[in-house]
Image: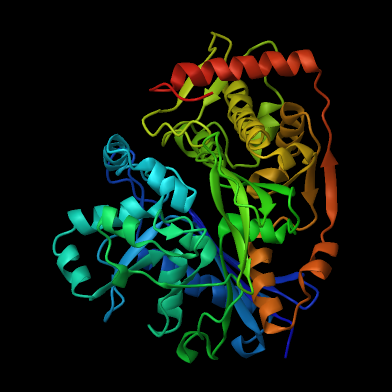
Amino acid sequence: MSGFVLSIDQGTTSTRAIVFDGTMRAVGTGQQEFPQHYPASGWVEHDPEDIWASVIATVKAALKDAGLEAGDIAAIGITNQRETVVMWDRETGRAVHNAIVWQDRRTATLCEKLKREGLEETFTEKTGLLLDPYFSGTKLSWLLDNVEGVRERAEQGRLLAGTIDSFLIWRLTGGRAHVTDATNASRTLLFNIEKNAWDEELLSILRVPRSLLADVKDTADDFGVTERALFGAEIPILGVAGDQQAATIGQACFEPGMLKSTYGTGCFAVLNTGETLVRSKNRLLSTIAYRLDGKTTYALEGSIFVAGAAVQWLRDGLQIIGKAADSGVLAEKADATQDVYLVPAFVGLGAPYWDAGARGAIFGLTRNTGPAEFARATLESVAFQTRDLLEAMRRDWPGGAETKVLRVDGGMVASDWTMQCLADILDAPVDRPTVLETTALGAAWLAGSRAGVWPGAEEFAQSWALERQFTPRMGEEERARRLNGWRDAVRRTLTSAVTD
């Protein structure tokens, strides 16, 4: 069997398909952006048909770019934007509504109601998550209660629902498989991560019929086979993981204490805690890092909603840069004497604040503030938020204090300026790997190893290679001053008291 593996990386703003060869080198790529929909303030949706069309188009493009046929591919791995949900008709496969995206805040009122009823502790104990609109469960509840006829059809067993991976697998297999993996299930507010099962009590609280939900498999497992008519040959789907868990795997963070952070639309730091399910006391998330051969590995995660999305705002909203890569060049020109802080709470603040009502704010503006200062404040906000996450992780888990190096990936890490800023603010080395497509690589490794054409975890970890390490240059006094300014800006932005 060939060593070629196809990875489908279905993200928030675009879909990528990458073909990797037997040496785990990318040999073919396809990428396509798709529209974002904002039907109301704080609401974010995707048309599932746009996502499906982008997957088909990018897979074909990647195969063509690699000079391969579908029959040359040993396996497919899928990684996806997490928490985003779709509900569709069991017979036709058509969605009953647009997908509700992870960034969407429409269920904030429901989350607050459940908190007032004293139910957050129940959800957190079972799922490791907090009651926040970010997660899938309340989005499903909203669809059931607000789209005409949907609850009745769901209770009749005529509908199915799931995260993007489930929707794609259903389509790819011609409706033969309604499945997901443990990492995606762990982000729904409905999955007991200790028992590794859908939780009947939580389903009852959110009034979500069990019949909607997929069967939950390991991250490397048999998820079905693609229909021949799609690509010209049947291809087994053998690996699935949510994007941040896939990046954790792609960064070879297989040992407890290893830490990675992905800088895409949002920023997500994941700390491997091994077999230990660490219960956060600092409003981080306990989650499943991966599940292999029935054995669950856990992680602590900090989620920042806006990272690269803030750079998109500079480009599309303020129109002060022509492309995202210009942000670091512009930031380098900023007046160092100006202390401008951007708190990018465009869709609320994530960990460790979890303030759904907060909105973006800028502090420290003067008459001399211009595009360069805006760019610097935008990029620095990502570093400040990452520092917040790492400090919380170290308080939660003593083993986290031993973590001295951060492995990074995602679109933003191509900027040397941004990575140096990150090292300065963290006061820790930042390691950028030679392979930046770690999310796609992680999904590919799951599929390739399952197919028996790629190496196991230990050999895969040995293949990880450093492209550049960024070490701190900023003095401690300057760092402390900048961090104090950031914390003051966040305090002024929050809508309610939060635990520091």
Q: How many marks?
A: 0
Residue 335 is at least partly visible in this image? no
Q: Nearer the viewer, residue 322 or 49?
A: 49
In this figure, which colouring scheme has been used for the structure? rainbow
Where the C terminus falls, by quadrant? top right
Q: Is residue 478 left or right of residue 298?
A: right
Residue at position x 60%, y 51% from top? 277
Q: Position of residue 385 (x, y in %)?
A: 60, 32
Residue at position x 14%, y 60% from top? 148
Residue 381 is at least partly visible in this image? yes
Quadrant of res 284: top right
Q: Position of residue 290 (x, y in %)?
A: 61, 63
Residue at position x 50%, y 40% from top? 305
Residue at position x 25%, y 52% from top? 142
Quadrant of res 155: bottom left
Where the N terminus falls, by quadrant? bottom right
Residue lying farthest top?
367
Q: Nearer the viewer, residue 438 or 476?
A: 476
Residue 497 vertical placement versus 234 (above, below): above
Q: Is residue 132 left or right of residue 195?
A: left
Q: Position of residue 190 (x, y in %)?
A: 39, 58
Residue 440 vertical placement versus 367 (above, below): below
Q: Position of residue 317 (x, y in %)?
A: 45, 35
